[in-house]
Image (cartoon, rainbow, N blue to C red):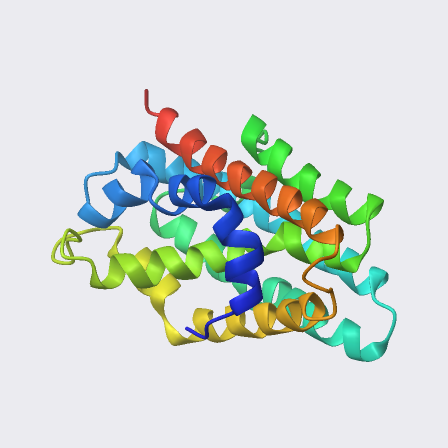
Amino acid sequence: MTRYNLIQKQLVEPNVIAWQDYTHHQFVEELAKGILPKSSFQHYLQQDYLFLKHYARAYALAIYKSDSIAEMAPSFSCLQGLIGSELKLHLDYCQQWGVDAQAIEALEEGVATVAYTRFVIDTGLAGDLLDLLVALAPCALGYAEIGTRLYSAASSVQNENPYWPWVEAYAGDEFIFSVNSQLSFLEKKLNQIPLDSPRWAKLQRIFCTATKMEFAFWQQGLTFNS
């Protein structure tokens, strides 16, 4: 995966504790070992589909917030991928786990799902394009980091692990390419901000809150079985 210096130095490192809690959550650690309760994973899949619908809306908002066609293009590509393939693939995956598409559409959103998705969209509505892109960043960056780490981790179990296709998907070339496309645009936008600008403080708060929301989303799936 491509290294993004400003994203790492100015957003991840100031929030390293929240970032570690998110990317090393018990949910993904148990998933990689194949010991996550099936009901927890099914609940996560259902809520993740509902999350992705709002994620698509957020990228539509990013297009609206863009000042030029060139700025619109990266968000349009993400939106196109979400609606054109990712949501359908997610539904197909859900059905493999016995989760019916109509049941998902009728499902009530979990509290963590509501909190996270509305935070991202509210950030975009109240702020500018950069605020919204930073709120979106922990999802793409975190899943790529989790997927690639778990794929090669000594503690991970591949054989007879029903969740291994999930790990492979988020460590795969197609997903990493998509993430790099998103983050390269964000990195370019961040490069326009002087390092001594007070603007960074706001962006760091947005990134931190979104990261904590990701933690809560894992926790929601984990505690569903409790």
215 with respect to 61 (left or right): left
Q: Farthest residue to the bottom: give it.
A: 70
Q: Farthest residue to the top: give it.
A: 226
121 with respect to 2 (left or right): right
- Residue at coordinates 51% horizontally, 44% vertically from top-left? 15
- Residue at coordinates 15% horizontally, 51% vertically from top-left? 155
Indicate the position of residue 42 as horizontal and vertical percent values.
Answer: 38, 39
143 with respect to 160 (left or right): right
Pick the front one: 31 or 189 = 189
Indicate the position of residue 188 as horizontal and vertical percent values.
Answer: 67, 73
Indicate the position of residue 56 as horizontal and vertical percent values.
Answer: 67, 56
Q: Quadrant of the N terminus?
A: bottom left
The picture quadrant where one finds residue 69 is bottom right
Indicate the position of residue 162 as horizontal and vertical percent values.
Answer: 22, 51
Image height of 17 relative to 132, above or below: above
Image height of 105 relative to 83, above or below: above
Image height of 211 relative to 194, above or below: above
In this figure, what is the number of numbered marks? 0
Pick the front one: 129 or 114 = 129
132 with respect to 84 (left or right): right
Residue 103 visible in the picture: no
Q: Farthest residue to the right: give it.
A: 67
Q: Farthest residue to the front: give it.
A: 196
- Residue at coordinates 59% horizontally, 29% vertically from top-left? 108
Residue 200 visible in the picture: yes
Q: Quadrant of the C terminus?
A: top left
Image height of 138 relative to 39, above or below: below
- Residue at coordinates 26% horizontally, 57% vertically from top-left? 150
